[in-house]
């Protein structure tokens, strides 16, 4: 899990998440909002009291973004939680109301129950649930066909990636990569051998570092292929 400071609302309804007294985090329908690092820490799962926070997010159909998972996968989970929590509330109200009326000797038919649900605001809640169920149906079709189960595969930029580290490491810029290589000569030798095997073959120092193209691992050869595809490396 790689949570980022972003709350995402995959529902078709505007949402206001209560944060502290007098402060709400408003997220538009089908939108998202960046939050502060303090807010991120408060919403992060696993903290004491995080169950209550998660229950609020579930009820509103909002999730804290995990950059390792796709939108479709996370949205489906959030919408299912949205439907589940609201259906539980409707069921609890219905059972409690019917129980109390039956105990008082009052019969409750379906029409009367629908009126009571509307009066308590649960009729509108059921309409929202029905609308979200339509979205769940669409997302389930997509996610169920996803062999990666929502895992995000990041395309590495060959001009700022060192493929000889395990796993390959992408740097914020080409300059950052150059600085890293200048501070790690052995890694730099293997890196140079991977992106320029001809010059590496003529360098005993690079061969001693174990970076010749013929002895490269399958992962390293794959990385080199990526460099060749994108063009000459100028990092």
Image (cartoon, grey):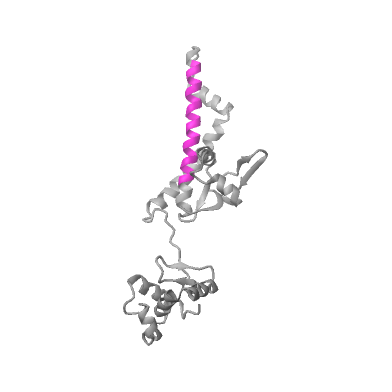
Main secondary structure along the magenta-highlighted residues: helix
Residue 48 in the image: above or below residue 91: below
Image coordinates of residue 69 in percent, x first then y, are 45, 54
Residue at the outermost left position: 215
Residue at the outermost bottom position: 202
Q: Which residues are magenta?
A: 77-101
**Is residue 219 at all visible to an observer of this figure?**
yes
Q: Nearer the viewer, residue 111 or 68?
A: 68
Q: Nearer the viewer, residue 124 or 159?
A: 159
Image coordinates of residue 212 in percent, x first then y, are 35, 80
Residue 22 shown left or right of residue 199 in the figure = right
User: Would you identify the image quadrant in which residue 115 lies?
Assistant: top right
Residue 40 in the image: above or below residue 105: below
Residue at the outermost top position: 105
User: Would you identify the image quadrant in which residue 206 lies?
Assistant: bottom left
Image coordinates of residue 147 in percent, x first then y, are 36, 56
- Which residue corresponds to the image point at 41% horizontal and 51% vertical from the top-left? 143
Residue 141 painted magenta:
no
How many marks overall?
A: 0
Q: Nearer the viewer, residue 211 or 186?
A: 186
Residue 96 in the image: above or below residue 25: above
**Is residue 34 at all visible to an observer of this figure?**
no
Residue 97 painted magenta:
yes
Image coordinates of residue 167 in percent, x first then y, are 40, 65
């Amino acid at each position: 899990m790689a949570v980022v400071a972003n709350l995402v609302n995959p529902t078709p309804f505007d949402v206001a998440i209560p944060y502290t007294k007098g402060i709400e985090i408003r997220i538009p329908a089908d939108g998202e909002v960046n939050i502060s690092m303090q807010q991120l820490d408060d919403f992060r799962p696993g903290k004491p009291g995080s169950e209550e926070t998660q229950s609020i997010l579930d009820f509103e159909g909002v999730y804290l973004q995990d950059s390792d998972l796709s939108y479709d996968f996370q949205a489906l989970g959030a919408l299912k939680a949205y439907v589940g929590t609201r259906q539980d509330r409707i069921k609890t109200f219905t059972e409690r109301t019917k129980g109390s009326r039956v105990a008082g000797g009052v019969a409750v038919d379906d029409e009367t129950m629908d009126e009571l649900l509307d009066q308590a605001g649960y009729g509108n809640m059921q309409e929202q649930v029905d609308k979200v169920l339509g979205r769940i149906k669409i997302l389930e079709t997509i996610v169920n066909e996803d062999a990666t189960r929502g895992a995000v595969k990041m395309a590495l930029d060959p001009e700022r990636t060192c493929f000889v580290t395990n796993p390959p490491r992408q740097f914020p810029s080409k300059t950052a990569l150059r600085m890293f290589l200048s501070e790690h000569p052995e890694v730099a030798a293997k890196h140079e051998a991977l992106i320029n095997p001809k010059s590496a073959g003529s360098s005993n120092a690079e061969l001693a570092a174990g970076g010749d193209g013929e002895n490269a691992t399958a992962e390293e050869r794959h990385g080199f292929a990526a460099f060749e595809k994108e063009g000459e490396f100028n990092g």
